[in-house]
Image (spheres, rainbow, N blue to C red):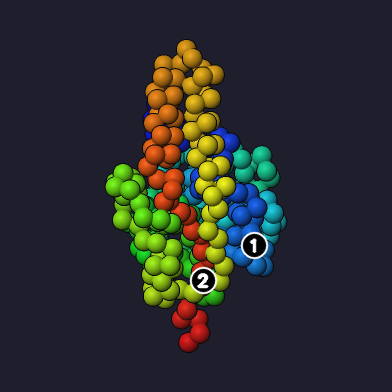
Amino acid sequence: MSREQISAIAHADHPIKSPLADDSVTRLLAHGLPRGDERVLDLGCGTAEWLLRALKARPHLHAEGVDTSEVSLTQAREAATDLGVGGRLTLHHQKAADLTPTHPFDLVISVGATHAFGGLLPTLAAAREHLAPGGRVLIGESFWDRTPSPTAVEMFGDLADLATTVDHVVADGWTPVHGHVSTRAELDTYEWACWGSLASWALDHPTDPAAAQALETANAQRSQWLHGYRDSFGFLCLVLRRTSELS
C-alpha cells in the first residue's frame, strides 16, 4: 500500500488534512475571503477540500489548486462536479513550487504544506509571487507548544515555539489579521480520526493483502503520537497581509 493510499484512507473521516474542526475552517476562510468574489489559489491543495468549501459557500468565487497527486486531484474534480462548482475550479498537476505566476490571487492558501517549499518563510515567499495587491495569505504551520522529546524533533524537525513563529512571520514583512491555534480537542480528534480510520479499514478488509500493513501503520503512528509528540506538538493558522501595504 502506497503512502498516498494510506493517507486517503486515514483522512476518510477528516478530509481537512490538518488538526482543525469544521467551524475553525469556516472562520479562517471568512477572514481570508471577506468579499466572497475573490480569486483563490491553494499551493499543495491535495483533494482541494479548502477550495471546495470556499466555492460551495461563495457562488461568485473562482479557485485554483496545485498538487503532485493525480489521485487527489481526480477526487477533487469529482467532488467539485458533485457540488456543482466544477466550472469555477481549475486544478494543476505539478509541484506547487514550480507553478508559474500567471495572474494575481486575492487569497493564497498553504495549510500543512510548507514542506513543499522548504519551510514557513520560503512558502510565504512563494505565496507573495502569486498575491494581488491587498491580498491575503492563509498559512498553517506546526510549532512546539512545549519542549519536545528527541523523538518528536526527529519526526518534525527543529520547529520554533508559537511566539517565535509569529515573530519570524512579522519580521518577514507580514501582519497577522487573524489567527487560530488548534485546541487540544482539535489535535486529538485529528489523530484519533486518522489512525482509527486506517485501523478500521484494515479490520473491515481482513483478506486484503494490504490489511496487515495498514493495521501495523495505524498502531505505529498512534503510538508515536501518544508517546512521542502529543504533549509538545502545536498547529497554528494565520491570515496575513503584507505590512508594506502601509507605504
Q: Residue at x 56, y 42 (%)?
A: 189
With 238 as the anchor, is 34 left or right in this view? right
How crowded is the residue under tag 1: few (<14 C-alpha within 10 Å), some, or many (20+)? few
98 vs 133: above or below: above
The residue labelled by disc 2 is: 176
Spatial CA distance of label 2 from label 1 is 15 Å
Give amino acid for label 2: Pro
Give amino acid for label 1: Ala
Tag of residue 30: 1
Nearer to me, 117 or 84: 117
Q: Residue at x 59, y 64 (%)?
A: 32
Query: Could you say where residue 124 lies in the image, as x and y percent from the top left?
Result: 41, 65
Secondary structure beneath disc 2? strand
Q: Residue 223's quadrant in the figure?
A: top left
Query: Could you say where residue 26 lies in the image, as x and y percent from the top left?
Result: 64, 55
Nearer to me, 51 or 39: 51
Q: Residue at x 54, y 50 (%)?
A: 184
How crowded is the residue under tag 2: few (<14 C-alpha within 10 Å), some, or many (20+)? some
167 vs 112: above or below: below
214 vs 63: above or below: above
